[in-house]
Amino acid sequence: MMKVTLRNLCKYFQQIKAVDGLNLEIAAGEFLALLGPSGCGKTTTLLTIAGFYKPDQGEIYFDEQLVNDLPPRLRNIGMVFQSYALYPHMNVLDNIAFPLKLQKVPKSEWKARAIEIAKLLEIADLLDRKPGQLSGGQQQRVALARALVRNPKLLLLDEPLSNLDAKLRIFMRAELKRLQKELGITTIFVTHDQIEAMTMADRIVVLREGRLQQVGTPDELYDSPANVFVASFIGTPPMNLLDAEIEVGKGDYRVKTSHFSFSLPKEIVAKIKYIPSHGVVLGIRPEDLIIGEGNIRGLVYVVEPLGRDELVTLEAGDMRLKALVPSRLRIGLNDKIEFSFSVERVHLFDKETGKSLYKEA
Amino acid sequence: MTKKTGAAFPYVLLVLVAAPFITMYVGFFLRAFGEGPQLGIFPERFGLSNFSFLWEPITWGLAETTIWVALANTILFASVSGAVVTVVCMLAGYAVSRIEFKGKNTFLVLQLFLHAVPGQILLIAIFFLLYYLHLLHKIPGIALARASLEIPLGVWMTKGFFDAIPWDVERAAMIDGCTRLQVWYKIFLPLVKPGVAAVFIWGFLFAWHDFIYVYTLLPGTAKLMSTLIQSLLATEVIDYGYLAAMSLLYMLPPLTLFVLLQRALLKVPIFGGKGI
């Protein structure tokens, strides 16, 4: 197990700052997700950790060793690529054993170790097939076996699930998580899919345009997003974000939107750092909306059944809000309804900077 | 009716254009296997007497040689040339495809420019170069010079093969513990195998039918097929049957190679050969 430290990591491509001043500590044995939309610098970060890109500034440490100038082959890492990148001219056994053969491990040993890891990943019956004869899921297991066979100190996964079909992806999510915990290898995992990051990772790093937005456990990111970007990126369906203003009265903080207003409960007021003069963004998670009771009037715009729940889009004034409600409500299109929300669970952000108004926990 | 005439027109035109060439080829085959006087392109009778060079010595100036010596020399010349083109291009092609270095684009443009320079212009310079390197009048030396003419385009060709290999495959190999050179021969060469074959054949063929380099730089010391056939033309009485038969033999190896490996060769743009 190995600790990885990034200190002020910067990587530029001409004028574009792909990674801009990233500071991160990845604990030994941790499963960390780098999450962000495409072009946010997550893959660049991964490739820089792997040693394919040289940082323009900053340092990468594996435990206490500075590895900026160490070529990838000497870093003792395993990596699974989005395309799996198996060697098409070798069969599965040779693919898995390739890193061992390069280390000049004797044949009896590399064979035994490759078969052992193949058994662990349940691909032992495919050993003499060529990659072209395998399904996507099997190829991914082979790629994983090849990455794990030489007991790397660090495992890097670049969108490893994005080429699998939906059912297999959900299955592999759990498998990968279990495997990582069993082997205890420090793992960095790149994804643009927040559900993947939420379900698998111990901690998530949210990146945007090369800059760190927030680091935290899935719960921390969900419950206390640091800014509007994280708030809108984490959670399905995404958080409702509405323009609002805060009016300070006698011991009373009122949040006013164009269609409704409400008083902030004391526990929220206590968390607020400051009140911006130029307005705020009010965030309400869809599951915090309560339909059928309350004093806000609205119209049902569309209903999307999800099985257990229904996703209802409400029109209230010039706003549209999404609500996640139990299916049995049986609401129809264009129904006039009343609704409210859990005021103690709202989020507030500075409209100009996008940053949360709440003090950090 | 008019529609049919219209549809037939391109075929008529193509047949008219092709007719002289087809006639020449048919005549060439008939001549090689014909004996006695000719009636137009048709010989009086057929036989194998034109192929007497296969079992009889051939006069070469004041000396004598056999077809087998010439054939062996030509194979040596073309193989060395093909091998040099293959090794140099496969290495250089990998470098320009995958490694960033200063002046890479200039280098690539220069290669195209070099390719545009006719090989004959370089003859005198190459003559002196080989002379000082003590390679003049030696088949491997001339093969080296011949290979250098195909390398510029070959580098572009092999760059194309390597460009088609995904970066992830190379990265995976480097993570697995490969040095750059190991990536090249353990992963990339096996993946571009048809390309390796194609580049070799391409280098082989251009050397095989080369005349001017062989004629200028190997004067009389080593007999190759192209210079042997030229010597038959340079006599006062030309035996066309004999010439056709020997030319047929000269055509056979490249033709066989091409038929056997045409699928690999189709991946290579065989354009703009030096044609010398």
Image (tube, grey):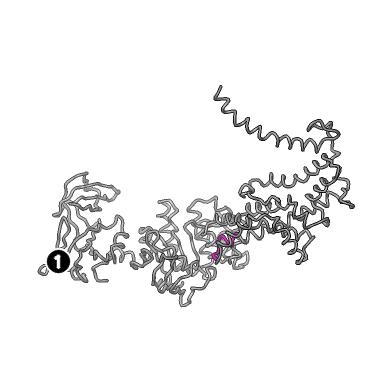
**SS for tag 1?**
strand
- The structure residue drawn at horizontal position 48% and vertical position 59%, both measured from the top left corner, is A81
Q: Residues within 10 Å of mark 1 (few under 14, many from 20)?
A: some
- The structure residue drawn at horizontal position 51% and vertical position 55%, both measured from the top left corner, is A139
**Does any portion of residue A361 appear in the rendered image?**
no
What is the span of residues highlighted in magenta in the rendered image?
A: B93-101
Q: On the rendered structure, is A163 left or right of B220?
A: left
Mainly helix, strand or loop, the magenta region? Answer: helix
**Does any portion of residue B197 appear in the rendered image?**
yes
Q: Is residue A284 magenta?
A: no
Q: Nearer the viewer, residue A233 or B17?
A: B17
Mark 1 lies on residue: A253
Q: On the rendered structure, is B24 left or right of B185?
A: right
Give the image location of residue A169, x and y in percent. 42, 54
Q: Residue furthest right?
A: B62
Q: On the rendered structure, is A327 left or right of A106?
A: left
Q: On the rendered structure, is B209 left or right of B165?
A: right
Q: Amino acid at mark 1?
A: Tyr
Q: Nearer the viewer, residue B162 or A229?
A: B162
Give the image location of residue B259, x and y in percent. 69, 44
Q: Quadrant of the N terminus of chain B?
A: top right
